[in-house]
Image: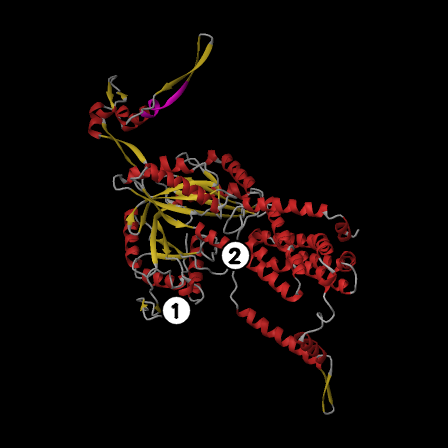
Amino acid sequence: MNFSAWSIRNPIAPLLAFVLLLVVGWQSFNALPITRFPNIDIPLVAISIVQPGASPSELEAQVTKEIEDAVAGITGAKNVISTVTDGVSTTVVEFRIEVPTDKAVQDTKDAIDRIRGTLPGAIEPPTVTRIDVEGQAILTFALKAPDKTFEELSWFVDDTVKRALQGRPGVGRVDRYGGADREVRVELDSAKLDSFGITAGSVSQQLSATNTNLGSGRSEVGAGEQAIRTLGDAQTVSGLASTTISLPSGRHVALSDLGTVSDTYEELRSFSRLNGEPVVTFAVFRAKGASDVSVKATVTQQLDALRAAHPDVQILPIDDQVYFTQGNYDAAIDTLLEGALLSVIVVFLFLRNWRATLISAVALPLSAIPTFWVMDSLGFSLNLVSFLALTLATGILVDDAIVEIENIARHIRMGKSPYRAAIEAADEIGLAVIATTFTIIAVFVPVSFMGGIPGQYFEQFGLTVAFSVFFSLMVARLITPMMAAYLMTSRDGGTEEDHRDGAMMRGYLRLIAATTTTWRFGRLKLGAYYVTLIGAFVAFGISMYFMLQVPGSFLPPEDSGRISISVELPPGTTLNETDKVASVIYDRIKDIDWIDQVFILGGSSPTGELDIRRATVTVLLDKLDHSLLLKLSDAARQIPGLGLIVPKVENKGRTLPQDVIEAEIFTRLRTVPDIRAIKLNDRGAKDITFNVLAPNDEALTEAVTRLEEALRGDPLLANVAAEG
């Protein structure tokens, strides 16, 4: 069936179809979430078990090995990695990529429940959670209030800020860092216990038995029924202090007679510092599939309301990952519009007819906008990868329309009416257009079915290109011939004089003719096509050589204005010592040019594991001014330790690239004793990680030592360190 001829004879149906596609496509564009990278789902499950006071060797023998044996037999389990520290055992199970994450979490919970009775009774209930590889905070804020204590600010975050943000559309969770949790402490006096003849254990048992709320059945009141509850939970600290304690002698005393009951806060296990000052901070995480930009707008609105309701509390932004996402989105939209405009200009320069250019240019919006509807239906988002696909396809989308309109113009020059020319030209060129389009689709669709983690990133790339090109084929076969039949005139085909070869084309044809001749060198005859073939192979070899010189990476390095550093102190370090080292680190790097803020989170590893001898340093830089980058001026000055001359221009953005500032930071951190500082990538992890297995501890230590020494000698590697 000739679809083009049908479209020309029945223009209403294809026009209505594409109007509907434009409407749903535009609605989908406005509804698509805006993220930095595609949403990926990697089945990783973490099992965390806490046993206060237990040593790593004790946990390994009694807990970790039992957990590993239980999860190793789960269907789809690929790798099991455990980390054991003082009082905490964490096991991460990596499942095969085809296993649904929800199923992996449920199977892991079932496996842990089956062995719960074999684990030590002193452990806290095991925690089984999924690990979200994209679960970094998108917004981080600090709180300051001169009239509030550190503990009151912590309660303000837990009670007020979390209530205002959690449950809002797109907000996944809100975590607080630093500060302290409320704790009611009962300190018993041993002398008073001895005088009354009671033990601390007996007091604890009585408090546990009486300080609780219990269901006590039901009663009938008239014609109705009412539940009965026994309320023993003390509502105030004074109420707890007056709790009656039974003595072995049969007498009764108040709890306050045996010791002191105080309303205080638990011992700090973490801290946060902003520019050297202790602060309470909280981070906002987006829900899976939500838009970064929408979440930021929601959070900003709620925090503005909180600032108005609590003017005594300052809520200061620290880190904003959405800034880069919004910047990528704006740049991608600008690039798409610029590319579309340039495509139209190029088409006009070659076709030299405004009607033909208009008909070809219509293919761009009619192909790109319906693609957003397909993206929305498949659960895609507007991110770097999908925008890259659309940008790449911008030039391809008008190809089919140009081929169609040029062939129609040729038939008009033959003396045919635009109506007849459109029908015959579209039928003549139809198979070639379809073959060209499906060739492009055949190239890009397999990219979407790539295996592993890269496949999840590039799924949106291949399918976005394929669907946009498919819509361009539909436009070329249905809309372009129909518009040409009704909009073009007999003059739009031009004359033969208009379509004679120009100087450039004539020169190109002479070059082609020269490559088919035979050159004579005396008696020696040499075909020019051999020279052409040899030249092609030489060009190919040179291209391959330079291609191999280009560094390879999954994503190109970018200047995000954000440097993340993991700091580790020796075993046995207290939180107070970690806090002192954090102050030293800030003093060493605070005067480096272009550093805006330094945020230090102590007592936590980059992956969120609580560890009092670790800290995460986030250095936020001034915004980069690309127009001034590395330009020398009379106002230039030298940064100590770098040996570089860079300009310092007031009221302008940063003129020094991020990697140079990183080098200066690590140069200064090397002078801080007894720390291990490691740079993290933008995902909060190291670029390259190896897992070393060995039959025993001695062999493992020897292998890690030798491997670490060998890697440290490689000039391409930096910050080589072993953990575990």
Residue under label 2, please give it.
Answer: 334
Image position, residue 125 (x, y; %): 43, 35
In this figure, which residue is indicated by the disc labeled 1? 631
Mark 2 residue type: Asp
Q: Secondary structure at mark 2?
A: helix
Q: Position of residue 716 (x, y in %)?
A: 45, 66
- In the rendered structure, are the residues bearing label 1 and label 2 in contact, judged by CB atoms less than 8 Å apart? no
Q: Quadrant of residue 610?
A: top left
In the rendered structure, which disc, 1 or 2, sits on the residue that comes first in sequence? Answer: 2
User: Is 646 displayed left or right of 509 in the figure?
Assistant: left
Label 1, secondary structure: give it.
loop
Residue 723 falls left or right of residue 267: right
Is 426 included in the stretch rendered in magenta?
no
**Left or right relative to 386: residue 67:** left
Q: Amino acid at mark 1?
A: Lys
State how far apart marks 1 and 2 are (Cα). Answer: 26 Å
Residues drawn in magenta:
207-215
Q: How many C-alpha atoms fall within 10 Å of the one at disc 2: few (<14), some, or many (≥20)? A: few
